[in-house]
Amino acid sequence: MSEPSSSLSSSKDELFQLIKRLGTYLALKMSNLFSISLQKLDPRSVGAIAGLAVAIIFTYRLMRSPAAPPRRQPKRQAPTTSGSSISAQSNATLMPSGACSPSEDLRAQNVVDEFFQPVKPTLGQIVRQKLSEGRKVTCRLLGVILEESSPEELQKQATVKSSVLDVLLEITKYCDLYLMERVIDDESEKIVLLALENAGIFTSGGLVKDKVLFCSTENGRTSFVRQLEPDWHIDTNPEIVSQLARFIKYQLHVSPTRPERTAPNVFSCPSLEHFFGCV
């Protein structure tokens, strides 16, 4: 505790001796100056003398001002019986100045992890990736786009699945999409087209009514697909999927159960939206 005080006192004495010698030198010079006739002094010499005098007085007063008392060391707290308090005091003692606490390191790490977290792909990016950049897609309506599962039901109503709308609209943005279905009569065609129109499928600009095809037999749908030569065909009928496996690059078999894979280019999923990760 005495070493800092003694070093401070020694430095103060050395500075005082230096100022004392400087004062003696200045006094000698000033006595020589005053021996000269004041009439011969120009205003610049008088200003220099006055400045030296002010500097000496200011330095002398500064050295005479009492030094600030040394700061007391904080008293050590008595050890508590709590183990957490002891460990906290130990960490505070051992931690160097400027070091970050573990909680600060953890917060910083969380910020870094969030910053470098991979960006979640958009639905459009997923659609293009899943379809392998395919440009033409054919898809049946029953069981995929519509809630109904038979042509007989379409004679009464047609209900578009709300869960499939986003996927369907994204497909129309990047692909040439054709929808097709077997119907019993012309009235069923009107019911289906009205349901698609009310769902907003035709408003995106990617799908028009002329690309909704109707036929009277299952073989007619197969013929449509063969003629259009799409990159992807989506269907619920396993027989049609099997027949087209040799001619179509990729197929998606929509089935509530997971059927046995019939070909390497045939994929299966419970629904179209499930295939694109929307459920």
Image (cartoon, helix red, strand yellow):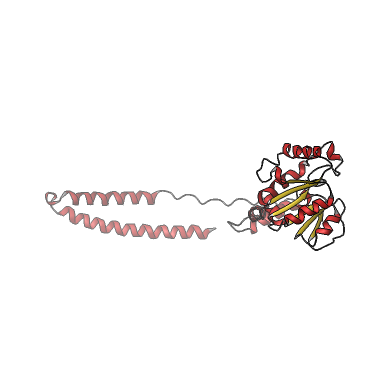
Q: Pick whichever, 214 or 110, lies toward us.
A: 214
**Residue occupying the point 49% across, 50% down:** 69
At which x and y percent is residue 12?
41, 57
Q: Is residue 16 visible?
A: yes
Figure label count = 0
Q: Is residue 268 left or right of residue 10?
A: right
Q: Pick whichever, 48 or 100, lies toward us.
A: 100
At which x and y percent is residue 1?
55, 58
At which x and y percent is residue 129?
70, 56
Q: Pick whichever, 83 or 181, lies toward us.
A: 181
Q: What is the quadrant of residue 245 in the picture? A: bottom right
**Residue occupying the point 80% across, 51% down:** 221
Q: Is residue 116 left or right of residue 258?
A: left
Q: Is residue 81 visible?
A: no
**Residue occupying the point 82% across, 43% down:** 183
At which x and y percent is residue 114?
66, 53
Q: Is residue 228 left or right of residue 257?
A: left
Q: Pick whichever, 223 or 267, lies toward us.
A: 223
